[in-house]
Amino acid sequence: MSLKHKAAAPAADSSLFDQSELQYQSGFGNDFATEALAGTLPVGRNSPQRVAHGLYAEQISGTAFTAPRDVNRRSWVYRIRPGAVHSPFKPYSNAWVEEPLCAQPEPNPMRWNPLPIPAQPTDFIDSWRLFAGNGAPQSMSGCAIYMYCATESMGHRYFYNGDGELLIVPQEGRLGIKTEFGLLRVEPQEMVVIPRGCRFNVSLLDGHARGYICENYGALLRLPDLGPIGSNGLALSRDFETPVAWYEDQEGDYELIAKFQGALWCASIGHAPCDVVAWHGNYAPYKYDMRRFNTIGTISFDHPDPSLFLVLQSPSYAPGVDDIDFVIFPPRWLVAENTFRPPWFHRNVASEFMGLVQGQYDAKSGGFVPGGASLHNCMVSHGPDAETFDKASNEDTSQPRKVTDTLAFMFETRVPLLPSNEALGSPLRQKDYYLCWQSVARHFNSGESV
Ligand SMILES: O=C(O)Cc1cc(O)ccc1O
Ligand SMILES: [Fe+2]
C-alpha cells in the first residue's frame, strides 16, 4: 500500500536553499547551542516548567543515557509541538526495503554501472536501491548500502530512520535538506550524516540527484584517533558543519515516513515536522567537504594501507576493528620511489564496497565509472587491472606524479557484505568484470632477478 502524497514541493523550498551562505556551526560532535528566535533556550536547565514562546522541550538521545561522556550524544530541542503529535504509523510498502539480501553470496568481485535516471517521477526516499548489507537493525550492528537516483523533491513527505544513522555521499546533483536541526545544502564532493531518528526532507536543487547511502545500524560514526600522525591531519574536526536552528510553522497535510526494524511506515501529520525553534546538544546532522581532507601518504616508498584515508569510523567492540570505515581516495601526489604506486593486488578480511564520485580511480583504467560501484568481499582477490599494472610497473618513479580530478570512496566493513538479489541480477551488473585481470601477463623468468 502506498500512501504517497503527491503534493508538490512548496515554492519557497528551492529559494530556502538559494541563499549562497547557509549558516553552519563548526566542529565534529561539539556541544552546540542555537536559536532561530532569540531568548528561546532555557538558561541553566533543560526542562523548565514552561519553555519560552510556548514551546515544548524534547530530548533526542543518540547513545545510551549512561554512555561514557566522550561518546555520549544527545540534544534538547524546543519545538512548536512535541514529536508525538502525529497519527499512528501504518505499513508503507516500498520495494527497496523488501528487497532481500542474498543468503549465499558468491566469492567473485562485482561491479555495477550507475543507476539510470528513473523514467517515473521519484523522490529521494522512493529512489533508494539496496545493493548490499550485513548485520541487522535488531542487533544494532552492521549496515545497509543503497544507491539513490531521484528526480523529484519530497514536498510534504518527511522521513526518519529508526534503524540507523545515514551517511549520504552525493555523486550528482545538490540536495537541499530540511531537518529538525536546521537546513543543509550538500553537493557532490561533500557528504552528510543524518542521525538516527532525525526527521528530514530532501529537495533536489539540480533537477535530479544520484548518490550512495550507508545506513549504519551500529555505533555512531566518529573521527578516528590519529596516533603517531599527531594532533592534526585526515579529516579536521573544524571542517564538519552542523546547521543552525531553523523552523517551519506550517499546518497542512504532511506525511511522516519511518524506517523501523527493516520496514517502512507512514503516518499522517497535520503540520510540517521541522518545527524546532532552538536546540542545544551534540546529536545533530553534519556535513563535510571531502575536498578539505588532509591526505597523508608515504614520502619514501611503498603504498600504505588505505586506513590512512579514513574519514569516519563506526567502532565495533573489538579494539582497533571497526564495523564500518568510511575511506576516501582524493586527489594527491604520488612520490614513492621504486614503488608500485597504485593499490596493490590484495585480499582483505574486511569487505570493500566502493563508489566513484568523480573522475578515474587509480587502480582501474576503465569500467569503474562515476556513479558506479564495486564490491570486493572478504578475501576476494582484487587490485589493479592489467592496463594499470603495466603502466605503473613502467612508470618513472624518480618523478612525483599528481592524481587529479578524482574522488573515490569505500565503505569497508568488518563482516562480509551480502549483495541484494536485485543487485546480483541487475542489468547494471558488469558480469565481465573479472576479465580486467585475465590479461595480466606472466613475466616469470627464473634466470633474471628484476
Ligand atoms: O581499490 C581497493 O581495493 C581499495 C584499496 C585501496 C588501497 O590503496 C589499498 C587497499 C585497498 O583495498
Ligand atoms: Fe581493496
Image: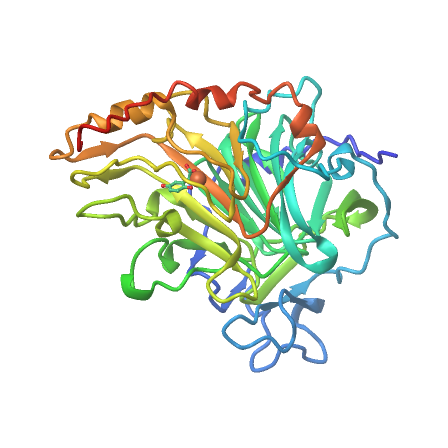
**Closer-to-camera residue (123/92):** 92
**Closer-to-camera residue (11/316):** 316
Kindly identify the residue that appears in the image at 47 percent across and 45 percent down. 348
Kindly identify the residue that appears in the image at 32 percent across and 25 percent down. 388
**Residue 105 in the figure: left or right of residue 291:** right
Coordinates of residue 171 in the picture (x, y in percent): 49, 32
Colour scheme shown = rainbow
**Closer-to-camera residue (308/204):** 308
Residue 95 to residue 410: above or below:
above
**Residue 338 in the figure: left or right of residue 306:** left
Coordinates of residue 276 in the picture (x, y in percent): 65, 59
In this view of the protein, can residue 96 be seen by the observer? yes
Coordinates of residue 362 in the picture (x, y in percent): 34, 31
Going by the picture, which residue comes out furthest to the front?
Answer: 447
**Residue 90 in the figure: left or right of residue 349:** right
In this view of the protein, can residue 200 be seen by the observer? no
Kindly identify the residue that appears in the image at 51 percent across and 48 percent down. 350
- For the N terminus, the image quarter is top right
**Residue 4 in the figure: left or right of residue 351:** right
**In terms of image quarters, where does ligand 1 lie?**
top left
Coordinates of residue 250 in the picture (x, y in percent): 72, 47
Going by the picture, which residue comes out furthest to the bottom?
Answer: 44
Q: Quadrant of residue 290?
A: top left
Q: Quadrant of residue 52?
A: bottom right
Residue 420 to residue 387: above or below:
below
- For the C terminus, the image quarter is top left
How many circles with numbers are drawn on the protein?
A: 0
